[in-house]
């Protein structure tokens, strides 16, 4: 066994949706550092190009290419698949990371906040995956399967609305769908796993994490006492996408600092003290 190659991604080709910001950017950097060629796509093509430039300036063994891609509509997914096909005929890694949220109090939650969120977080993720299957099948082998990593959330694992009702439900759907696809695609040498992140600093969470004081308050509510960091996402991605994760499918990686196992107080504690 060569443990030095367990997490290497030399020669692999990856697509990261929403790869220019937040968790997608963290993952893209890790994949490039591990030697992969990473395609970054989101609605803002220029932002993806700019991040690709930054990643290419790191002097890592991998490289990045950025372009526009919208997973919120069927036409957008079709156009993205065509663009990906211009760069590669096989795809070793697909990270379905693009996501949006909507927050409003119970009682005032708008109907339209369902369609938008479900379209990007669930329908777009599913449709992109199914349309890229030929390219994933072309890359996967029994010894080294192609990898799909879907970004769910701890809010899709635990009963947390936090005013983001359609978001939480969409992330539960992502986790469930990932397990269904894991079952259906194992025979095609494609693994499908999901991440269930807790709080990470990003554009989506900027309302509560934009300064150190807020980040520290958010971290205080996490059992492991901090918000997530780049390395936490990098570690998950290199495990799931490298040789080390080749025999793992249908998993939900709880990269949430322990929020996934917060279950309230111990039942008998009050009575005994
Ligand atoms: N940060 C957290 O605490 C946290 C926790 C759990 C899960 N997550 C999940 O992590 C993923 C990344 O979110 P983030 O926190 O890193 O926030 P973020 O910085 O806002 O990233 C979201 C990304 O999705 C892209 N995106 C949005 N709509 C899109 C569309 N229709 N087509 C293609 N790309 C689209 C955005 O780029 P454009 O605007 O250029 O399209 C952006 O790059 C999401 O799925 C989110 O739900 C985040």
Image (spheres, rainbow, N blue to C red):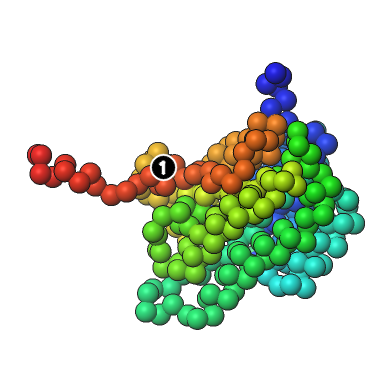
User: Where residue 50 sits in the image (x, y, percent)?
Assistant: 76, 53
Front-lying residue, 50 or 99? 99
- Residue for badge 1: 258
Q: In this view, does 201 lie to the left or right of 192?
A: left
Q: Is residue 109 above or below residue 187?
A: below
Q: Does the residue labelled 1 lie within 8 Å of ligand 1?
A: no
> In the rendered image, is residue 132 in sight?
yes
Front-lying residue, 189 or 107? 189
Q: In this view, does 27 lie to the left or right of 171?
A: right
User: Where residue 69 sits in the image (x, y, percent)?
Assistant: 76, 63
Front-lying residue, 112 or 267? 267
Q: Is residue 165 left or right of residue 192?
A: left
> In the rendered image, is residue 22 in sight?
no
User: Where residue 67 sits in the image (x, y, percent)?
Assistant: 80, 59
At 59% across and 46% down in the image, what residue appears?
A: 250
Q: Residue 79 appears in which quarter of the rendering?
A: bottom right
**Quarter of the rendering occupied by the C terminus:** top left
Q: In this view, does 130 lie above or below 242?
A: below
């Amino acid at each position: 066994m060569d443990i030095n190659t367990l997490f290497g991604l030399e020669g692999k080709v990856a697509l990261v949706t929403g790869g220019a910001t937040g968790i997608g950017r963290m993952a893209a950097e890790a994949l490039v550092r591990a030697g992969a060629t990473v395609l970054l796509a989101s609605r803002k093509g220029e932002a993806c190009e700019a991040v690709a430039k930054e990643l290419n300036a790191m002097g890592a063994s991998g490289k990045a290419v950025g372009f526009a891609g919208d997973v919120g509509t069927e036409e957008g997914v079709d156009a993205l698949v065509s663009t990906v096909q211009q760069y590669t005929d096989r795809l070793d890694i697909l990270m379905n990371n693009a996501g949006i949220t909507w927050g409003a109090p119970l009682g005032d939650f708008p109907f339209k906040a369902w369609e938008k969120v479900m379209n990007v977080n669930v329908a777009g993720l599913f449709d992109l995956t199914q349309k890229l299957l030929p390219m994933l099948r072309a890359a996967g082998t029994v010894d080294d399967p192609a990898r799909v990593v879907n970004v769910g959330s701890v809010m899709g694992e635990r009963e947390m609305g936090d005013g983001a009702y359609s978001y939480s439900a969409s992330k539960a759907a992502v986790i469930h769908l990932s397990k269904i696809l894991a079952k259906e695609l194992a025979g095609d040498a494609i693994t499908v796993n999901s991440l269930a992140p807790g709080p990470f600093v990003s554009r989506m969470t900027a309302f509560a994490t934009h300064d150190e004081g807020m980040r520290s308050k958010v971290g205080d509510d996490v059992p492991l006492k901090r918000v997530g960091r780049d390395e936490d996402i990098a570690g998950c991605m290199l495990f799931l996408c490298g040789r080390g994760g080749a025999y793992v499918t249908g998993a939900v990686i709880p990269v949430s600092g322990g929020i996934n196992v917060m279950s309230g107080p111990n039942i008998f504690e009050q009575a005994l003290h």
